[in-house]
């Protein structure tokens, strides 16, 4: 795009392009855990219990990663990035109007990225953990499938505590 605009506008485009490239590379090379593909450490556990333990561990790690990526240091880093755009264009090229616009738009886009990241992992994990405390109700009857006969048997089951 730079060769097609006036020469005095090129510095803003080049600096913005460099910033966009760095931002894109950071997003691609350092994704959220929940966005990353499965790694070998989670694949092929020995059995269902080990598989469940691995998935629970992964859920805890993903929730912690999601929560850590929207904390105030990230907002400060985003503000510093917008300020850096403004400073480079303002001090380096004496185009403060363009610098302020570039810095403000960089900050706004960064904040939009921060507030739209997935953050539901923690509440989903908490909901899952609460399920352990739920006791199943004892019903007065149950169905028991008998595979060797190929049918279904209905058996009465007395309630405990009645």
Image: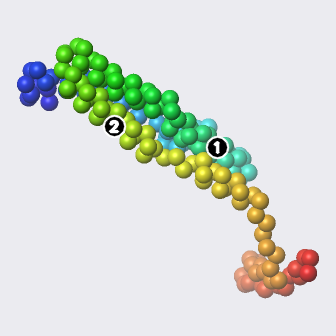
Q: Which mark is residue 60?
A: 1
Disc 2 + disc 1, Cβ < 8 Å: no
The image quadrant where one finds the N terminus is top left
| Residue linked to disc 2 | 108
Q: Residue at x 54, y 50 (%)?
A: 120
Q: Is residue 52 visible?
A: yes
User: In the displayed image of the protein, which residue is found farthest to the top?
Assistant: 92
Q: Nearer the viewer, residue 27 or 76?
A: 76
On the image, which quarter does residue 143 sit in? bottom right
**Nearer the viewer's eye, disc 2 or disc 1?**
2
Q: Which mark is residue 101?
A: none
What whole-number distance in Å separates the C-alpha atoms at marks 2 and 1? Answer: 30 Å
Q: Residues within 10 Å of mark 2 (few under 14, many from 20)?
A: some
Q: Position of residue 154 (x, y in %)?
A: 78, 86
Secondary structure found at label 2: helix
N-terminal-most mark, 2 or 1: 1
Q: Position of residue 45 (x, y in %)?
A: 67, 45
Q: Residue at x 28, y 23 (%)?
A: 86
Q: Nearer the viewer, residue 153 or 141?
A: 141
Q: Residues within 10 Å of mark 1 (few under 14, many from 20)?
A: some
Above or below, 99 relative to 120: above
Secondary structure found at label 1: helix
Q: Position of residue 102 (x, y in %)?
A: 25, 29
Above or below, 51 relative to 105: below
Q: Position of residue 97 (x, y in %)?
A: 20, 26
**Coloured how?**
rainbow
The image quadrant where one finds the C terminus is bottom right
Q: Is residue 14 visible?
A: no
Above or below, 54 relative to 84: below
Q: Residue at x 60, y 51 (%)?
A: 123
Q: Residue at x 78, y 85 (%)?
A: 153
Q: Is residue 149 left or right of residue 67?
A: right
């Amino acid at each position: 795009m730079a060769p097609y605009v006036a020469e005095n506008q090129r510095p803003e485009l080049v600096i913005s392009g460099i910033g966009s490239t760095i931002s894109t590379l950071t997003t691609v090379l350092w994704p959220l855990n929940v966005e990353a593909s499965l790694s070998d450490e989670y694949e092929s556990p020995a059995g269902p219990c080990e598989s469940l333990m691995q998935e629970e561990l992964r859920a805890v790690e993903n929730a912690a990663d999601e929560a850590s990526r929207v904390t105030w240091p990230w907002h400060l880093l985003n503000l510093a990035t917008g300020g850096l755009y403004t400073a480079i264009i303002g001090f380096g090229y004496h185009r403060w109007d363009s610098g302020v616009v570039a810095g403000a738009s960089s900050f706004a886009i960064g904040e939009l990225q921060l507030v739209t990241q997935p953050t539901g992992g923690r509440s989903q994990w908490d909901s899952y953990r609460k399920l352990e405390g739920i006791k199943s109700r004892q019903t007065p009857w149950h169905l028991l499938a008998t595979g060797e006969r190929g049918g279904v048997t209905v058996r009465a089951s007395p309630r405990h505590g009645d």
